[in-house]
Structure formats: structure tokens, C-alpha cells
Image: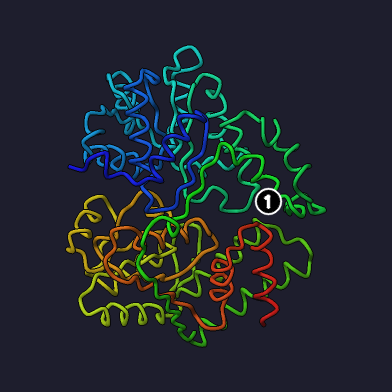
């Protein structure tokens, strides 16, 4: 059982900041212990009679296990009583009726909760948003649900390691949930007009010169930002790009898709939606398969990445390998080729950390937040990359974090002559805006 005096100085500093700014964001990178930091804060607020009931809103996997398990490992938080608002509606209602200190709900059920309780029965005075960037879309139902109860709470903490995965545009809705528009204006339109230039069609918003610095200056009093490298001794990371060839049949199909990209660009109608679809097709084919209908059927066009992945596993000499895939077709084909591979689940995570899983398969979205995998291995392979910087950075941090005892090897499997390389370059250079997606397509076409 760990003791409170084992907390780091930066964690204690974050707690004091949150007490002073009762509506604030703790932007702490993976490995800095934002969960126990927040639990310590909540325990102290309860002891000081500053909090009656707390609500934690989290991704489903995190809501199911992470918070309660973390509390149980520390002497000063093990007494906290949890009730999980998960499962069927009957189970969620029963959980609400339990007497607890902290209630945990997955983000998908937040809209249901606000409708079920309504304004008159809202009973939570403190809300923790874990992961806060899930509220970056001001048009989403979850943001509107949170906005509805904002005036009824006395304290709100936003937790994330990536507050603006697509640039400062993502910050408005998150900061609004903290200060109701005091710092970044009352409406998203006002925010855009002040800090961005829009393209002719209104699809893309480009920050005006100096906007990022101006926004950071406005919100710095309620945001604590901490990078893991500034506070922790992290393992060395060795990145390895493995390029695989594309057979003629697959290459011909790829050229056909690239022609579609070219036609879209020449017609001047390309937008982010079309770009994402076309990039997705290219990336899927680069991985080896291509969907043939909207029911999930696909055709395998090459196995080059499977061959490379098999080589990585063989060369690991028994060391476990974590594999990130992108598409269901990837998952199916990897499991066919590597029968010892195990798909991620709560049971698989526990077994992995005990060294009992030789190959763990995970989608970046399912393992990006709240999953500790550093005890089970130090080798990671990307079967395919996609254009999501937040998932990319968070997924790589699953093994590169405090507690890892070995250098971390990250292998990127890229198919030669495809958009694979362009996307990885964008991710590595941290291009975060929607415009970068369009630029990636243009670069791909210009490489033809």
C-alpha cells in the first residue's frame, strides 16, 4: 500500500492549484499520475467538507477499472466509496441510488444522465472530466449535456495529456465548461472571429499570427500544463521505420485510388470529409486489404506488412510485442497469421502485465487513455498509422512511461510509395489542424 508522502512535488503543486482555481484544467502528460493526483484532491475536499458528491466522466474502459483500482493502491484514498453508472439503464439507475463519494460514468452515457436527472434532481457538486479533450467538439451532444449542468456545480477539473489535439480551435469548448466564456468569449463564433481566418467555404480555420500565444496567455491562470520529460526519468525510445514493398496487383489498385485523389483536387471540391474517406482507403490498402462493400467484406491484396510483423515477433526472441492496428481487416488477418496474438481486454491487460501475453493487439482508440502496459513489454509495432495525432501520441506513451525498465522500441510498418510515409511525417511533425489533412493528400498526389 502506497502512502501519500510518496506523491511527487509536482503532483502536490497541481492539487494546490486546483484548490485555488476550483474550475481548472490539469494538462498532465501520460505517466505523471493525474489519476492519483485528482483522487488525492477529491479526498481532501471531502475531508474539508468542500465536496458532497463527485461525478467522474471518463472513457468506458477507464470508468470500469482505472479510478477505483488506483484509489485502492493508496492508503489515503482506499476509503473512497465508488458507484459506477455503467451497464443497462436499470443498472445505471441502481448505481445512482447507491450511497457513495464518487460516481463514475462513461462519456457515452452522459447525455442519458442529464436527461434522467434533469435540472431539478442534479445532485453532483464536483465534476471531473477525464479525458477533457473528448469535449472539444462544441456541436456534440456530450458538450451540450455538460453545458446544461455547468451552472449547478461548484468545482470542475478537466484532465488530459493532449488538450488541443487538432490545434487551439479545440480549446474553446473545454475552457467554456470551466469559465463559461470569460476567457475565450461566450460563443464559438466570437472565438473564431477573434483568433482565426476561415477559408472561402468555411471548412478550415487557420489561426491568425500570434493567436496561439494570445490564447495561452488568456487561459494560463486556470490551466496547469506538465510534460513528463520535465519531471520523470523516462526510458530511451528507439524508433525504427520498416518499409515493405507493394506487389503489382495492390500497386495498380493504389494508383487507381490516387487517381481519385487527383480528380478530387482538380475539381477543387475536396473537403475534410472527402479527404478523410480517400486517405482511409489509401491507408487500408497500404496495410494489405480493401473493403468491397459497406458490410465489412474485404479483399486481401498483399501480405507484406504481415510478413514484416511476423519478422518483428520472431526477432523479439520471446519478448512480448504490442501491436496497434487500424482496421478490422487488419485485426482479422493478423489473428489468422499470428494465432498466439490476443485482442486487448481487461483480462488481456492483466495477463500482459504479468508477462503471459506474447502479442497484444489493440486499436489506438481503445488503448489511448488510462491503460498501463509498461510492465508487460517494451516493443511496439504500428501495423498501420492513421491521421489522429492524439491517438498516436497517447498510444506510444503506453510503454514509454514511468515504471518501464527497458528501452522502448517502436516499429513503424510503412508500405513503400504510399501515403503511409506522408501521414507518419505529419504525425511526427505534430501537424494538428484539419488543413494538414488536405496538405497530406496534396503532397501524396504531388509525389506521383
Q: In the rendered view, tell whether residue 376 sits above or below residue 188.
A: below
Q: Position of residue 65 (x, y in %)?
A: 28, 42
Q: Is residue 30 left or right of residue 7?
A: right
| SS type, badge 1 | helix
The quarter of the image holding the C terminus is: bottom right
How many C-alpha atoms fall within 10 Å of the one at disc 1: few (<14), some, or many (≥20)? Answer: some
Q: Residue furthest right?
A: 200
Between 430 and 338, the residue placed more toward the observer is 430
Q: In the rendered view, tell whether residue 65 sits above or below residue 182.
A: below
Residue at screen point 32% across, 58% down: 402
Q: Position of residue 37 (x, y in %)?
A: 36, 40
The quarter of the image holding the N terminus is: top left
Coloration of the structure image: rainbow
Q: Which residue is mark 1?
A: 212
Q: Is residue 190 left or right of residue 387?
A: right
Q: Is residue 246 left or right of residue 339?
A: right
Q: Quadrant of residue 185?
A: top right
User: Number of numbered discs present?
Assistant: 1
Residue at screen point 55% across, 66% down: 427
Residue at screen point 36% across, 62% down: 233
Q: Position of residue 307 (x, y in %)?
A: 35, 82
Q: Position of residue 397 (x, y in %)?
A: 40, 60
Q: Quadrant of residue 398?
A: bottom left
Q: In the rendered view, tell whether residue 438 sits above or below residue 180.
A: below
Q: Quadrant of residue 253?
A: bottom right
Amino acid at each position: 500500500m502506497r502512502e501519500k508522502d510518496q506523491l511527487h512535488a509536482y503532483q502536490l503543486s497541481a492539487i494546490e492549484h486546483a484548490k485555488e482555481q476550483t474550475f481548472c484544467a490539469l494538462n498532465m502528460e501520460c505517466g505523471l499520475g493525474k489519476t492519483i493526483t485528482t483522487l488525492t484532491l477529491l479526498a481532501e475536499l471531502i475531508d474539508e467538507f468542500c465536496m458532497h458528491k463527485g461525478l467522474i466522466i471518463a472513457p468506458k474502459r477507464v470508468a470500469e477499472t482505472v479510478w477505483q483500482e488506483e484509489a485502492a493502491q493508496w492508503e489515503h484514498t482506499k476509503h473512497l466509496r465508488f458507484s459506477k453508472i455503467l451497464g443497462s439503464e436499470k443498472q445505471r439507475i441502481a448505481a445512482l441510488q447507491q450511497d457513495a463519494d464518487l460516481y463514475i460514468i462513461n462519456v457515452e452515457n452522459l447525455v442519458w444522465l442529464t436527461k434522467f436527472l434533469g435540472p431539478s434532481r442534479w445532485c453532483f457538486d464536483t465534476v471531473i472530466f477525464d479525458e477533457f479533450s473528448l469535449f472539444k467538439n462544441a456541436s456534440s451532444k456530450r458538450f451540450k449535456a455538460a453545458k446544461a449542468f455547468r451552472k449547478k456545480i461548484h468545482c470542475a477539473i478537466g484532465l488530459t495529456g493532449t488538450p488541443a489535439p487538432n490545434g487551439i480551435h479545440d480549446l474553446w469548448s473545454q475552457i467554456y465548461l470551466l469559465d463559461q466564456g470569460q476567457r475565450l468569449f461566450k460563443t464559438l463564433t466570437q472565438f473564431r472571429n477573434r483568433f482565426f481566418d476561415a477559408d472561402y467555404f468555411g471548412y478550415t480555420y487557420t489561426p491568425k499570427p500570434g493567436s496561439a500565444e494570445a490564447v495561452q496567455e488568456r487561459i494560463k491562470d486556470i490551466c496547469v500544463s506538465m510534460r513528463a520529460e520535465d519531471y520523470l526519468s523516462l526510458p530511451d525510445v528507439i524508433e525504427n521505420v520498416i518499409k515493405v514493398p507493394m506487389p503489382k496487383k495492390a500497386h495498380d489498385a493504389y494508383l487507381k485510388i490516387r487517381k481519385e485523389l487527383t480528380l478530387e483536387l482538380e475539381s477543387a471540391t475536396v473537403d475534410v470529409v472527402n479527404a478523410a474517406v480517400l486517405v482511409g482507403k489509401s491507408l487500408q490498402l497500404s496495410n494489405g486489404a480493401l473493403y468491397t462493400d459497406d458490410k465489412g467484406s474485404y479483399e486481401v491484396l498483399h501480405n507484406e506488412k504481415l510478413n514484416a510483423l511476423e519478422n518483428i515477433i520472431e526477432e523479439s526472441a520471446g519478448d512480448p510485442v504490442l501491436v496497434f492496428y487500424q482496421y478490422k481487416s487488419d485485426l482479422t488477418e493478423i489473428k489468422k497469421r499470428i494465432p498466439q496474438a490476443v485482442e486487448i481486454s481487461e483480462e488481456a491487460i492483466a495477463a500482459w502485465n504479468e508477462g503471459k501475453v506474447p502479442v497484444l493487439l489493440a486499436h489506438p482508440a481503445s488503448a489511448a487513455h488510462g491503460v498501463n502496459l509498461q510492465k508487460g513489454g517494451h516493443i511496439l509495432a504500428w501495423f498501420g498509422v492513421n491521421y489522429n495525432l492524439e491517438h498516436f501520441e497517447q498510444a506510444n506513451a503506453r510503454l514509454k512511461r514511468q515504471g518501464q525498465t527497458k528501452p522502448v522500441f517502436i516499429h513503424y510498418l510503412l508500405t513503400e510509395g504510399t501515403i503511409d510515409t506522408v501521414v507518419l511525417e505529419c504525425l511526427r511533425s505534430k501537424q494538428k489542424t484539419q488543413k494538414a489533412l488536405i496538405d497530406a493528400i496534396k503532397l501524396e498526389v504531388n509525389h506521383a
